[in-house]
Structure formats: C-alpha cells, structure tokens
Amino acid sequence: MESVFKIGDQVNCKKFGSLQKDFIGTIEKIYDNSAMVSIDKFDESDAVAVADFHNRAIVRLDSIKKRAVKG
C-alpha cells in the first residue's frame, strides 16, 4: 500500500509519550506504519522533551495529518 505522505511533507502530529501537546513537523523518513518527523513547532512546555528527542520523533502514521498548503 502506498503512503499518502511523502518526505518533506509538513504534518500535524498528535502528542505521545512525554509530549504534553500536539506539534508540527516535517517528514524525514517513512516506514511501514510510522514516520520519522523533525519537530519544527511545539509548545514551550514540551521544550525539555523535544530536546531529549533531539528534535525528532518516530510517529505512527495514523497519528499524523498532512497540513493544508496555503496559496
């Protein structure tokens, strides 16, 4: 099954683990059921967790929504 996501897509991701709020990221790599996402925009309360993750996270594909393209 081909993924609806592509490398470079901006996405909204649901919170998980030690992250308390949803975040915005960019897909860097796609796996079978998940994607590696660089964490671009996040709530300040999650700054320590994001730093611990080195600004990246593996997120389930069903927890990601593609961001609307403006223009």
Image (cartoon, rainbow, N blue to C red):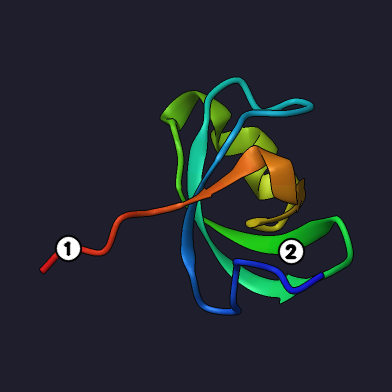
Is 46 in front, or is 30? 30
Q: Position of residue 7 (x, y in %)?
A: 60, 79
Specify the quadrant of the image occupied by residue 18: top right
Q: Position of residue 44 (x, y in %)?
A: 43, 30
Quarter of the rendering occupied by the N terminus? bottom right
Q: Are marks 2 and 1 in contact (CB under 8 Å)?
A: no
Q: How many marks are shown on the rendered structure? A: 2
Is 33 in front, or is 17? 33
Q: Which residue is mark 1?
A: 70
- Chain-order first, disc 2 or disc 1: 2
Q: Which residue is mark 2?
A: 36
Residue furthest toward the front? 1
Residue furthest toward the right? 32
Query: What amino acid is at disc 2?
Result: Met
Residue furthest toward the bottom? 7
Q: Position of residue 36 (x, y in %)?
A: 74, 64
Quarter of the rendering occupied by the C terminus? bottom left
Query: What amino acid is at disc 1?
Result: Lys
Query: Could you classify mark 2 by the number of other residues whose Cα lies within 10 Å: few (under 14), some (14-19), or many (20 or more)?
Result: some
Q: Kindly identify the residue that appears in the image at 38 percent across and 54 percent down.
A: 67
Q: Position of residue 6 (x, y in %)?
A: 59, 76
Q: Kindly identify the residue that appears in the image at 49 percent across and 70 percent down.
A: 9
Indicate left or right for 1 with 66 as reference.
Answer: right
Q: Secondary structure at mark 1?
A: loop
Indicate left or right for 26 with 57 as reference.
Answer: left
Q: Which of the two discs, 2 and 1, sits closer to the camera?
A: 1
Q: Which mark is residue 54?
A: none
Alpha-carbon distance for marks 2 and 1?
24 Å
Q: Kindly identify the residue that appears in the image at 89 percent across and 65 percent down.
A: 32
Indicate left or right for 17 with 32 as reference.
Answer: left
